[in-house]
Image (tube, grey):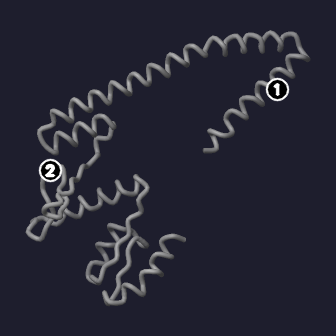
Amino acid sequence: MEKMTLGPTKRMALIGLAIAVSFVSTRASDIVWWFVVFSFALVPLAFLAGLLQIRLARASVAVLVVELLSADGLRELRDAIARTLNDPDLDLAVWLPDTYEWIGSDGRPYDHDYGDSRYAREDTKMALRQSKVSGIIPFCITIDRESEDELRDLYGEVGYTIIDDVMSLPERLPGIYRRLTT
């Protein structure tokens, strides 16, 4: 934000300084003149570069739409979006409202008979990492004391809390909320 607000101010100060110096010296006046001419010559080029950038963005969206329409499964859908966003680590999850579960781009949901829990743990880590990048701060509330090491690994030192009695949640929730928002 600072660059956006101070950038034009700094440029104007530099131009003002150059103009002031040009009154003192003839050589400085010549340099300022060529600087101004060069700057004005760059305006159409900058405009054309902006048009080219917009055209390329539209082309990228058009390619994405074509790929999304021809995607044959979640994996192809994920690959198309990852290519467009230039993010090879992108992971995609889809909510299935009929079964009340999330499935990954590999088509595998996580449930009790999932098998290897390491995959689910890594999947959860990736989802938490992506939510943080998106500006969402995940927080876990659980009654499972035995999972503290795992929670610390997933959420960090302050990203979770363990309560002893689920019935105490209503009275503890305002304190947890204050801790998260201050």
Q: Amino acid at mark 2?
A: Asp
Around disc 1, counting alpha carbons within 10 Å, would you say few (fewer than 14), some (14 to 19), or many (20 or more)? few
- As drawn, the residue found furthest toward the front would be 98
Q: In the rendered view, would you say 20 is above or below 64?
A: above
Expressed as whole percent of the image width and height from the top left, the position of residue 58 reads: 36, 26
Around disc 2, counting alpha carbons within 10 Å, would you say few (fewer than 14), some (14 to 19), or many (20 or more)? some
Q: Quadrant of residue 13?
A: top right
Q: Looking at the rendered structure, which numbered label has been put on residue 106? A: 2
Q: Secondary structure at mark 1?
A: helix
Q: Quadrant of residue 97?
A: bottom left
Along the horizontal axis of the image, is 107 left or right of 167? left
Judging depth in this view, the residue of 161 and 154 nearest the camera is 161
Answer with mark 2 or mark 1, whichever residue precedes in sequence: 1
Give the position of the C terminus as an image quadrant: bottom right
Q: In the rendered view, would you say 101 is above or below 105?
A: below
- Identify the residue under disc 1: 17
Along the horizontal axis of the image, is 27 left or right of 107? right
Expressed as whole percent of the image width and height from the top left, the position of residue 52 reads: 44, 19
Expressed as whole percent of the image width and height from the top left, the position of residue 170 reads: 39, 85
Q: In the rendered view, would you say 27 is above or below 108?
A: above
Along the horizontal axis of the image, is 112 left or right of 95? left
Q: In the rendered view, would you say 16 is above or below 44?
A: below
Q: Amino acid at mark 1?
A: Leu
User: At 67% across and 35% down in the image, what residue appears?
Assistant: 7
User: At 32% across and 28% down in the image, what residue appears?
Assistant: 60
User: At 33% across and 24% down in the image, what residue appears?
Assistant: 59
Q: Secondary structure at mark 2?
A: loop
